[in-house]
Amino acid sequence: MSASTIHAGSLSPWRVEWLRVWRTKRLVGLLFVYAFFGFADPLLARYMAKIIGSATNSSQIRITVAEPVPADGMVGYMGSAMQIGLLVGLAMLVSACAIDASYPLAIFYRTRRRDLWTLLVPRVTVSLATMTLGFALGLAAAWYETAILIGTPSGAGVLRLLAAGFCYQLAFGGVAFLLTAILRSVGTTTAIAIVLVLVSSVLTTWPSVARWSPVGLTDYAGIYAGTTGLRTAIVASLVIAAVAIGAGTTIAQHRQLER
Amino acid sequence: MQGDAAIVVSDLVKDFGGTGLLGASLTIPDRGVTAIIGPNGAGKTTLFTIVTGLVRPDSGTVAIAPAAGTLAYCPDTPVFERWLTASEVLDQSASLARRRSSASNAELLARCGLGEVGSRHVGGFSRGMTQRLGIASTLVTDPRLMILDEPTSALDPVGRREVLALLAELGAERGVILSSHSLADVEKVADTVIILAKGRVVFQGALDALLRQQERPVWRIRTHDDAATLALALAKAPGVAMAEAISPTQVRVRMQSMRDGERTLPRLLAESGMPIVEMVLDRPDLDDAFAAIVSEDHSR
């Protein structure tokens, strides 16, 4: 039996990652989550007054809700997408990138590829691309629904939200990737990532920190209106993502395999 | 690097608090089947993970001959991505290793007894099928050396026989290193045996040499009847250390030396005047040899 060099048609790491998101239905699941919020949040914004009115049907309490504006539909979607949508996406990213979580599977990969970055880069890239695709489709759904129910949102505002959401997900995706490389456990890493996402929302009350971190990308109303600057937070997010992905790859590359 | 040695391990230490490898030295030839056996915790899997570069040793060296070329490792319970088909697993394996056998996936799967299930997702495979796929996934990278950790542990008797035949076949064309708790399996396929105990090599050599080393001057003699009378007669003869009837028709005789047995025993049997059906050297099997070597090492 003789050997030959691998040629096109073999199952490359990039194709394996595509099959992972497709066959495990992760793509469908993530698109569903973002699409759900894309359609549901503008609907909620449109009928908020009625919902609250029926919930507080009392002669002693009167709540006045302002007439909805397009920003409400878009901001509502961003809030849901950057919390629940992001958490679902991070769980998928962690499970795809935890290359050492299963000892026998790690042997399969590590005895065939020494340069682990060639395995990890496709995993984190496809995971982030899937999250971005889901987020963008959800945003488009929110735009459509808002336009029908409330009024046409500002194109520039939606683009700013798209950039903010993309960078925010990228930063948290990078940090989750780094945690996966350090901890190797899908469960523990996902739990810590959830706590980080939830804690980050608290940091919005600390403007000096928020401005210089990805948390600055969560002032959705200000970003949509163009009153909140994006540049610093975007740069911070990109730097965090690049450093975290680089560090995670280096850690995974140099670590010994342990049972 | 020695003559046709593929791997030379010198004073290898990976200490997990008294277990692991505690100074193992061994040489693995580039052809044939080499079996590494030892009690649980003797350091077999640790040795494999160090040789394959998955784990760094505390001290010692592993030298792999450049001519040995590629090396593939299959753990005892391989795991694959559940949503890939068996054929895709082979494609993935070859792609990762950047090297592919000239044999097609269908040929390799058929060789490993998985000819009918190439398009099935491996998530539905039994343990035995997964173990066979593990062998196929190493074969597709066409390695010069294959390390298989307990390759038959999940197989039924028929599957075990098929895989052992495959391993013997592979050993003729490349180096196959395996570990197994089934010494009967090892005896069927191994050319070279390495026994590990307490993290050290206590025997290395050809299987025949191991069995010869453990030979004792003990014979079984079968007669038509009256084994007890024959045993009594032999017990008094010169050169006989012990003779006992182990059944109505069989006598077990221990001579004082192999030479005594080979030269004197046939004469003693002829002189007894009893009808002798056969006289067979009571050769130890690998179980006996393994038990003797390991217990000898424990008693040190």
Image: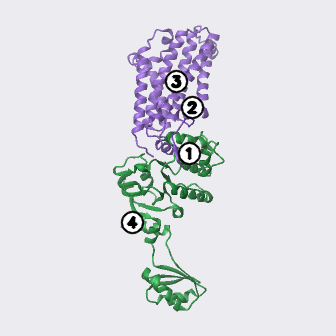
Which dot marks residue A18?
A: 2
What crowding class fits label 4: few (fewer than 14 Cα within 10 Å), some (14-19), or many (20 or more)? few
Could you say which chain is coloured purple in the image? A
Return the residue found at the far right. Answer: B116
Inter-mark Cα distance, 1 to 2? 27 Å
Image point 41% across, 61% down: which residue? B197
Q: Chain of mark 1?
A: B
Residue bearing mark 4: B297
Inter-mark Cα distance, 3 to 4? 62 Å
Q: Chain of mark 2?
A: A
What crowding class fits label 2: few (fewer than 14 Cα within 10 Å), some (14-19), or many (20 or more)? some
* Mark 4 residue element: helix
Residue bearing mark 3: A83
The amino acid beneath tag 3 is Gln
- Same chain for labels 3 and 1? Say yes or no: no
* Mark 1 residue element: loop
Inter-mark Cα distance, 3 to 2? 25 Å
Eye-nearest disc, 3 or 1: 1
Coordinates of residue B142 in the picture (x, y in percent): 51, 47
The amino acid beneath tag 1 is Ser
Q: Are marks 2 and 4 in contact (CB under 8 Å)?
A: no
Inter-mark Cα distance, 3 to 1? 50 Å
Task: Look at the image and tell me whether residue A204 can be seen.
Answer: no
Of residues B169 and B120, which is closer to you in this image?
A: B169
Residue B173, placed above or below residue B290? above
What crowding class fits label 1: few (fewer than 14 Cα within 10 Å), some (14-19), or many (20 or more)? some
